């Protein structure tokens, strides 16, 4: 009999493995400088929310403010983010993606989509249907995890 614990462990292993393999495969064709996962996540967040503050980015990414500041410094030095002084609070900086960051993110998203599509397309129809059927439950799981983190 399969228990919830068995499913939980297998799911965590499978999701982590898939994510790692996608990152490794995409990293091969990534232009220099290669970015770490946290850097890409910050760039994606800023591109989706131009003008975001460091503190808001830290909260959204569940990272310490100084960790996000370090990432911002790295991405700014690489020409992928820029800071602007917040006109409403001159002590704060607003984060904005550079055109190079936007181009890299578009390229990364297109390559990720093509990679995953190619492998999903190679699965049997039954496996594709099983993945599609699992998506709502996976989204609910993600939301539950997010809510738990936000309560802390």
Image: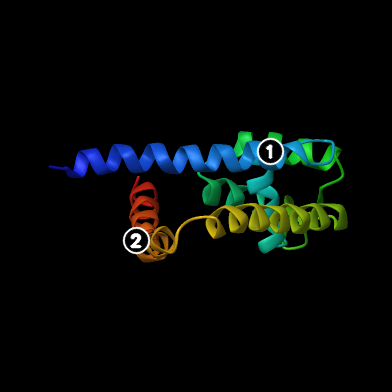
Kind of element beneath mark 1: helix
| Rendered residue at 77%/36% (across/down) | 34
**Colour scheme of the picture:** rainbow
Q: Quadrant of residue 4?
A: top left
Where residue 140 appears, as percent x and y from the top left, is 34, 61
Residue 137 vs residue 49, the one in the foreground: 137
Left or right relative to 4: residue 81: right
| Rendered residue at 38%/47% (across/down) | 149
Give the quadrant of the N terminus.
Answer: top left
Q: Quadrant of residue 144?
A: bottom left
State whether residue 49 appears in this view: no
Where residue 113 appears, as percent x and y from the top left, is 64, 58
Q: Nearer the viewer, mark 2 or mark 1?
A: 2
| Rendered residue at 57%/45% (across/down) | 58
Q: Which residue is mark 2?
A: 140
Give the quadrant of the C terminus.
Answer: top left
Per the rendering, the mark at residue 69 is 1
| Rendered residue at 39%/55% (across/down) | 142
Left or right relative to 119: residue 72: right
Where residue 63 appears, as percent x and y from the top left, is 54, 39
Kind of element beneath mark 2: helix
What is the C-alpha distance between the residues marked 2 and 1?
Answer: 31 Å
Where residue 71 appears, as percent x and y from the top left, is 70, 37
Residue 117 vs residue 113, the one in the foreground: 117
* Numbered disc total: 2
Is 12 placed above or below 47 here?
above
Mark 2 is surrounded, within 10 Å at the Cα level, by few (under 14), some (14 to 19) or many (20 or more) other residues, namely few
Is 56 placed above or below 133 here?
above
State whether residue 149 appears in this view: yes
User: Are the residues at dot 2 and dot 1 in contact (C-beta closer than 8 Å)?
Assistant: no
Is 114 placed above or below 70 here?
below
Sequence-wise, the earlier of marks 2 and 1 is 1
């Amino acid at each position: 009999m399969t228990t919830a614990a068995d499913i939980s462990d297998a799911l965590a292993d499978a999701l982590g493995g898939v994510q790692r393999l996608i990152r490794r495969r995409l990293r091969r064709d990534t232009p220099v400088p290669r970015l770490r996962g946290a850097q890409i996540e910050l760039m994606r967040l800023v591109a989706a929310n131009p003008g975001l503050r460091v503190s808001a980015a830290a909260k959204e990414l569940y990272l310490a403010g100084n960790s996000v500041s370090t990432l911002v410094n790295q991405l700014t030095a690489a020409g992928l983010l820029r800071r602007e002084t917040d006109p409403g609070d001159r002590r704060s900086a607003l984060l904005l993606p550079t055109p190079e960051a936007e181009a890299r993110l578009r390229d990364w998203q297109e390559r990720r989509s093509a990679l995953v599509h190619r492998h999903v397309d190679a699965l049997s129809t039954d496996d594709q249907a099983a993945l599609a059927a699992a998506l709502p439950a996976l989204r609910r799981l993600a939301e539950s995890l997010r809510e738990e983190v936000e309560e802390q």
